[in-house]
Image (cartoon, rainbow, N blue to C red):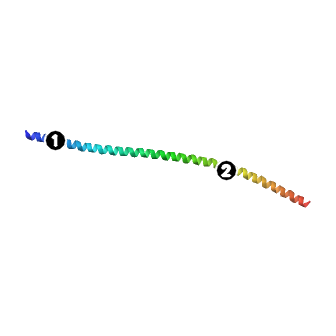
């Protein structure tokens, strides 16, 4: 009979030890899980920050393209005025030379 009692005590001790090991492993797994979830949250925040940054850059590019279009229009208008002025100057020179001949 005493042998059965010591066997039971040994079995209980082994079971307690096994449960302790399992609980330790569960704690480690939960720590790793939390760490991974934190990394995912950080990655999500970083991704959102990059998306916002990209959006701001796209808005700046759009504004620059608008300014470029306006500047091209102004350049074209100035070029046309320059051409008209050159034509007028040419006509004036022609008239001057004709008047000089008279």
Q: Quick check: marks 1 and 2 in contact, CB under 8 Å?
A: no
Q: Residue at x 39, y 45 (%)?
A: 38
User: SS at mark 1?
Assistant: helix
Where is residue 91? Give x, y as percent: 83, 55
Q: Quadrant of the C terminus?
A: bottom right
Does 37 sit left or right of 9 as displayed? right
Q: Which residue is mark 2?
A: 71
98 up-or-down from 70: above or below = below
Q: Earlier in the sequence, mark 1 or mark 2?
A: 1
Give the residue furthest to the left: 1
Q: Is residue 94 left or right of residue 18?
A: right
Q: Position of residue 13 (x, y in %)?
A: 17, 42
Q: Secondary structure at mark 2?
A: helix
**What count of labels does the image hold?**
2
Residue 12: name its quadrant.
top left
- Sort mark 2 into few (<14), some (14-19) or many (20+) by Cα contacts within 10 Å: few
Q: Residue at x 62, y 48 (%)?
A: 65
Q: Residue at x 78, y 55 (%)?
A: 86
Q: Which is more toward the observer, 90 or 12?
A: 12
Q: Position of residue 28 (x, y in %)?
A: 30, 45
Residue 2 at what x, y percent from top left?
8, 40
Q: Is residue 22 left or right of residue 89?
A: left
Mark 1 crowd level (few <14, some 14–19, many ≥20, 10 Å Cα): few
The quadrant of the image that shows the N terminus is: top left
The numbered disc on residue 82 is none
As drawn, the residue found furthest toward the right would be: 102
Q: CA distance from mark 1 to mark 2?
A: 88 Å
Left or right relative to 17: residue 43: right
Name the residue at 33% across, 46% down. Answer: 32
Q: Which residue is mark 1?
A: 11
């Amino acid at each position: 009979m005493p042998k059965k009692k010591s066997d039971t005590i040994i079995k209980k001790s082994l079971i307690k030890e096994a449960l302790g090991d399992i609980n330790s492993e569960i704690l480690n797994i939960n720590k790793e899980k939390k760490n991974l979830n934190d990394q995912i949250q950080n990655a999500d925040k970083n991704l959102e920050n990059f998306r916002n940054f990209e959006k701001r850059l796209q808005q700046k590019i759009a504004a620059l393209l608008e300014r470029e279009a306006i500047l091209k229009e102004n350049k074209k208008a100035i070029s046309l005025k320059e051409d008209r002025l050159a034509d007028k100057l040419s006509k004036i020179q022609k008239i001057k030379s004709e008047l000089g001949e008279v």
